[in-house]
Image (spheres, rainbow, N blue to C red):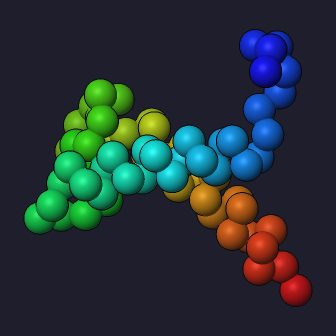
Amino acid sequence: MAIDEPVSRATELFMAERVLDAHWSRVHDRPWPTGGCLECQGQHDCPQLDWALGIVADVASVLFQK
């Protein structure tokens, strides 16, 4: 795949799943809070986790449309 080609939604969803897995597996006592990746900036601030949750929510909204 060339660098200038747009990223497919499936690829974005796969990358989002990897981000969610990193956060889930590294914070055992409190799943899903920040602290699972190098982008985590504070106690409640991670742009990568916010992006991943946004992608998953967007895909879920398309899947569950009436």
The image quadrant where one finds the N terminus is top right
Task: Give residue 7's quadrant in the image.
Answer: top right
Where is residue 47 drawn, in percent x and y? 45, 37
Horizontally, residue 28 falls left or right of residue 60, namely left
Percent coordinates x, y for residue 9 in the rendering: 76, 46
Quadrant of residue 3 in the image?
top right
Q: Residue furthest left?
A: 29
Image quadrant holding the C terminus, namely: bottom right
Residue 32 higher or lower than 38, as above or below: below
Left/right placement of residue 13 relative to residue 64 reads left
Q: Is residue 53 above or below residue 61?
A: above
Instruction: Name the residue rendered at 80%, 14% in the picture.
Output: 2
In the visual, does 22 lie left or right of 17?
Answer: left
The spot of residue 49 in percent (x, y) is 43, 46
Residue pictured at 37% horizontal, 39% vertical? 46
Q: Residue 5 placed where, x, y %?
A: 84, 21
Task: Name the residue located 51 percent from the left edge and 52 percent from the top edge.
Answer: 17
Q: Quadrant of residue 4?
A: top right
Numbered-mark total: 0
Name the foreground residue: 15 vs 62. 15
Q: Residue 16 or 57: which is nearer the viewer?
A: 16
Q: Is residue 41 above or below residue 27?
A: above
Q: Can residue 33 be seen?
A: no
Looking at the picture, does residue 65 appear above or below residue 56? below
- Residue 16 visible in rendering: yes
Q: Residue at x 74, y 70 (%)?
A: 61
